[in-house]
């Protein structure tokens, strides 16, 4: 299964972006999908996740209320809508997929996801 992320760009603080991640060669409709990000010199960190059969969505604290994750199973795509972007959101954003549904406590763990996209750069200037 391959993941293709897109939608990154260079924006000003306060702007919005929507990232997309399309899966091909398989589906994660009964598993989980997530976004992670990695800033220069920092470890890859969890941003948001959604999983099959769960109406909840999961976010890291710093993006709650600003970012929204959503999936379209018909299009085999997951989105990350980002509002009120801040310079500290600058990073390379990766989408990740798990074919098997992760348990909720594991959604923030990189090792729960076997499939990764190539990353899309988000740069926010002040």
Image: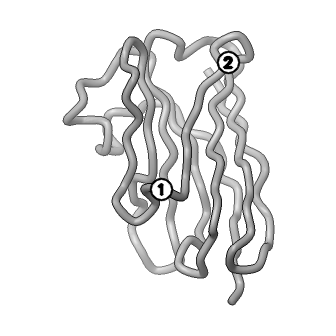
Q: Which residue is mark 2?
A: 76
Secondary structure category for the residue under label 1: loop
Residue drawn at point x = 53 percent, y = 78 percent: 88
Q: Which mark is residue 65?
A: 1
The colouring scheme, among rainbow, by chain, secondary structure or one colour, is one colour
- Please state if 117 lies on the left or on the right of 99 as rendered: right
- Please state if 92 lies on the left or on the right of 125 as rendered: left
Quadrant in which residue 53 is drawn? top left
Quarter of the image for the C terminus: give it: bottom right
Quadrant in which residue 86 is drawn? bottom right
User: Where residue 33 appears, x then y in whole percent?
Assistant: 49, 30
- In front: label 1 or label 2: 1
Q: Nearer the viewer, residue 16 or 90?
A: 16
User: Where residue 114 appears, x then y in whole percent?
Assistant: 43, 30
Above or below, 88 relative to 73: below
Q: Residue furthest front?
A: 65
Quarter of the image for the N terminus: give it: top right
């Amino acid at each position: 299964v391959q993941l293709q992320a897109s939608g990154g760009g260079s924006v000003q603080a306060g702007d919005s972006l929507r990232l997309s991640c399309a899966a091909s060669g398989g589906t994660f409709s009964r598993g989980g999908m997530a976004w992670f990000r990695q800033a220069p010199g920092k470890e890859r960190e969890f941003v948001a996740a959604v999983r099959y059969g769960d109406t909840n969505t999961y976010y890291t604290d710093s993006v709650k209320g600003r970012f929204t994750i959503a999936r379209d199973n018909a299009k085999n795509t997951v989105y990350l809508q980002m509002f009120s972007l801040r310079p500290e959101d600058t990073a390379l954003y990766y989408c990740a997929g798990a074919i098997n549904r992760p348990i909720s406590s594991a959604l923030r763990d990189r090792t729960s996801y076997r499939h990764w996209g190539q990353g899309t750069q988000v740069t926010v200037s002040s």
